[in-house]
């Protein structure tokens, strides 16, 4: 078995790891906005505001992505939400993400867009329900 074959055999599992890690990182944004933990500058936003709506999407989408449940629709929704965050909040400040602080939003957008196409991987509720 060659190195490439070994790495390729692990690719589906690593997709699951990427989905879980990205979901957990997104989930913390929703937790601080909606649940107030951990406390950050975004804690306590109004649910009727754009950050509040984003927090609801981050909380629910993060949970779904961590579980791998309804993965493709959740990934598509959060990909779009992070794209909106980038273009509405960060891009008006500067063209360059490193200057406008939008690297995280842009990276989230593309990671979740990839997961939308790639699927949840084998370690997911979606995969278990297919069996």
Image (cartoon, rainbow, N blue to C red):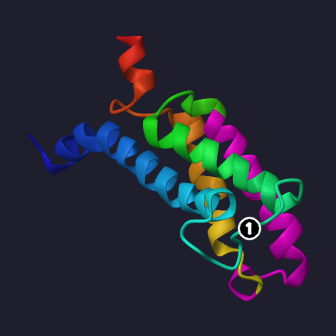
- Give me the residue at 34% from left, 37% from top: 12
Query: In the figure, residue 130 lies in which quadrant?
Result: top left
Instruction: Out of 71 and 109, give the one closest to the viewer.
Output: 71
Give above or below for 40 relative to 3: below
* Residue 39: in magenta span: no
Is 63 rendered above or below residue 84?
Answer: above
Residue at x 8%, y 40% (from the top left corner): 1
- In this rendering, the count of numbered labels is 1
Task: Decide: is 76 above or below 80.
Answer: above
* Name of the residue lying farthest toward the left: 1
Measured from the top left, where is residue 93 in percent x and y? 87, 83
Left or right, 52 with reference to 36: right
Considering every residue shown, the one lying at the far bottom of the view is 99
Q: What residue would you read off at disc 1?
A: 44
Q: Determine the image quadrant of residue 71.
A: top right
Is residue 64 visible in the rendered image? The answer is yes
Q: Give the residues drawn in magenta, as a range.
A: 74-99
Instruction: Look at the image and tell me whether residue 113 can be seen.
Output: no
Residue 20, image x, y percentages: 42, 47
Q: Is residue 114 left or right of residue 9?
A: right
Seen from the viewer's position, the closer of residues 25 and 122 is 25
The quadrant of the image that shows the C terminus is top left
- 108 over 3 or under it: above or below: below
* Most frequent secondary structure within the magenta stretch: helix
Q: Is residue 26 left or right of residue 98?
A: left
Q: Position of residue 54 (x, y in %)?
A: 76, 54
Instruction: Indicate whether residue 78 is drawn in magenta.
Output: yes
Can you tell which quarter of the image residue 125 is in? top left
Residue pictured at 65% horizontal, 51% vertical? 58
């Amino acid at each position: 078995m060659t190195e490439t074959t070994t790495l390729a055999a692990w690719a589906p599992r690593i997709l699951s790891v990427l989905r879980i890690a990205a979901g957990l990182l997104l989930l913390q944004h929703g937790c601080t906005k909606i649940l107030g933990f951990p406390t950050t500058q975004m804690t306590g936003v109004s649910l009727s505001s754009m950050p509040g709506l984003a927090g609801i999407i981050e909380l629910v989408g993060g949970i779904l992505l961590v579980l791998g449940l309804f993965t493709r629709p959740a990934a598509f929704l959060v990909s779009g939400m992070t794209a909106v965050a980038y273009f509405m909040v960060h891009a008006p400040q500067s063209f360059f993400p490193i200057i406008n602080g939008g690297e995280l939003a842009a990276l989230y957008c593309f990671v979740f867009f990839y997961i939308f196409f790639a699927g949840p991987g084998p370690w997911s509720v979606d995969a278990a329900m297919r069996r």
